[in-house]
Amino acid sequence: MLTSAWIIPLGIAVGVLVSLAPSRIARLRMSQRIARGLKVPQRVVDVDPAQLASYDMRQGPYASGDVLDERTWEDLDLDAVFGRIDRCASQPGRQLLYHMLRRPSLDGVTVLAFDASVETMRRDPAALARVRHALIPLATRQAARLETSLFGALPARPALWWVFPLLTVLSVSLLALIVVWPLALIGWIGVCIATMIAQMLYRPRVREFVPAMQALPDFIDVSRALGAMALPGLADECAVLREGAARLRGLESTTGWLRFDNSVANELAGSLYEYGNLLFALDLTAFVLTTTRLQAVRETAQAMYRALGRIDAMHSIATWRDTLPAWTAPVFTSPGKALHCESLVHPLLEAGVPNSLHVHDTSVLVTGSNMSGKSTFLRALGVNAVLAQAVGTVCASTWNAPVLHVRTSIGQGDSLLDGKSLYMAEIDAVKRMLDEKAGGAQHLFLLDELFRGTNTPERVAAGYATLAWLDRGDDVVVVATHDLELSRLLGARFEAYHFREQVTDESLAFDFRIRPGLSSTRNAIALLRLSGFPAGLVAEANATLTAREAEVPAERSPRDPVGATPRSAP
């Protein structure tokens, strides 16, 4: 028989136990989900681009000294390239891999160390599978918000934050006491009213932050699982995760109630969850306790995020490498005007034609007709230069080059939104390249049909002057053009290569292979014929071309627009 002296302590004890129950249940459900994931691997959920880039954007604005800029990212279609190399099993891994591609390393030693760890993991399929299975709980949309809770600004804790846990304990205790002490009902109703008022005042301030914390328990569990693994070459990362998980253990209890995602729950479960919050302030209590604890261990959690993301990025590249018909790790040479690659292909092409390029103390001028492969080759060079420095992987059999800042002017058109013509857009892109030459870094400049937005005489003159200027020093310039006259003007400073095609009565065939020398074929008028233009129109076009070529004066040697300054000039 319970005496009145035992009623209040018993009620409080019951209240505390009931308050802790959600976190225990949540941990049990987490263990069940991991067990299911070991049998049925899940695919990481796609998130919007802003969420994917959130970690990278938090590192600050892009500077002129970065390996990439926005124009180059768009010209090389690196969003699609990221989609091709992304084999990550977690959202933190995807966010860190995106950051690595968006801001490639300038340190060859760091890249080669990354490559060594990737290869160690790739050669151990069992370890690769264990890593992927351990990461499964962080494949959710909530896990993509984890970065916000670890690196973003958290709401300030209210001065009377301790009222929320007090309301939770009082509400549960008084409810439990009603069975043996009916008068507790009056007190419980009063506490419920106070809880509802607290909900109305504070809940709107924290609603947007709750999703960012829902993945914290999963993050800790996954970190603990990875930290317990013996992954060769990743001892430092595993130690960070193992020790960090021990420090963050207290967050598992405080975030247990926040794990519930009302947006995907059934109607009954969602209603019970909302009533529990309304009557017992469970979400407010969990939130203030979580933010308080998280502030104290934030640096540890951030280091864990980077270590976990790095392991997943290595897992992704190791998996991607196994899908490639051929690849190589880059060899970074000392600064100098040189670039050597064998059997280079574009990673977005399923059956790309391999091409080789050997540059030593010259730049490169690529000619060829429409659709022959010039622009694709430029993009293949740029994309693989980025991949070499970002993830230590090149789609080629050989890649020997210095660390290069890649800058491009490819595929720009008129911009109605910016109010810029094609010519002005090209001027902006080239001016950016000229400005960055003063920075001291070595560049790979890739240009396609320079100044195509203006008339032929001025295009050739301006193109010649610009290319001669960009070629100065150790920067490597690769330009694709239809203007054969540029080769005569630039002389030996630009080595000529070309792509060609075969025109028949019925078709136009390309082999997409680069060859030394200038192009000797054309296909613009042939394309008119093959596209069904009137035969008389095609004949007149050919006759006009023949007549104009007969009128072209003998080759001239105009004065160098930049004063024939040697390439080595500053």
Image (tube, rainbow, N blue to C red):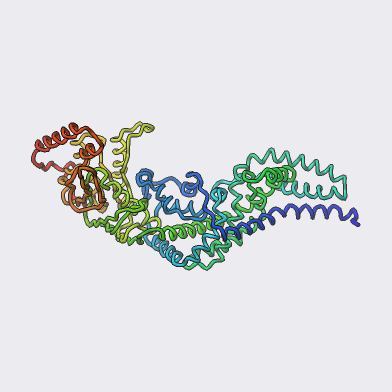
Residue 559 in sight from this viewpoint: yes
Q: Residue at x 72, y 49 (%)?
A: 165
The answer to which of 80 and 309 lies nearer the viewer is 80
Report x, y in % for residue 63.
39, 46
- Judged left or right of residue 117, residue 214 is right
Q: How many marks?
A: 0
The answer to which of 341 and 72 lies nearer the viewer is 341
Residue 468 in sight from this viewpoint: no
Give the farthest residue toward the front.
Answer: 506
The answer to which of 93 and 287 lies nearer the viewer is 93
The answer to which of 309 and 545 lies nearer the viewer is 545
Report x, y in % for residue 354.
29, 56
Q: Residue 220: name its quadrant.
A: bottom right
- Judged left or right of residue 143, residue 515 is left
- Judged left or right of residue 71, residue 135 is right
The quarter of the picture where the N terminus appears is bottom right
Q: Residue 528: name its quadrant.
A: top left
Report x, y in % for residue 313.
46, 57
Report x, y in % for residue 340.
27, 58
From this view, report whether residue 411 is shown above or below residue 100: above
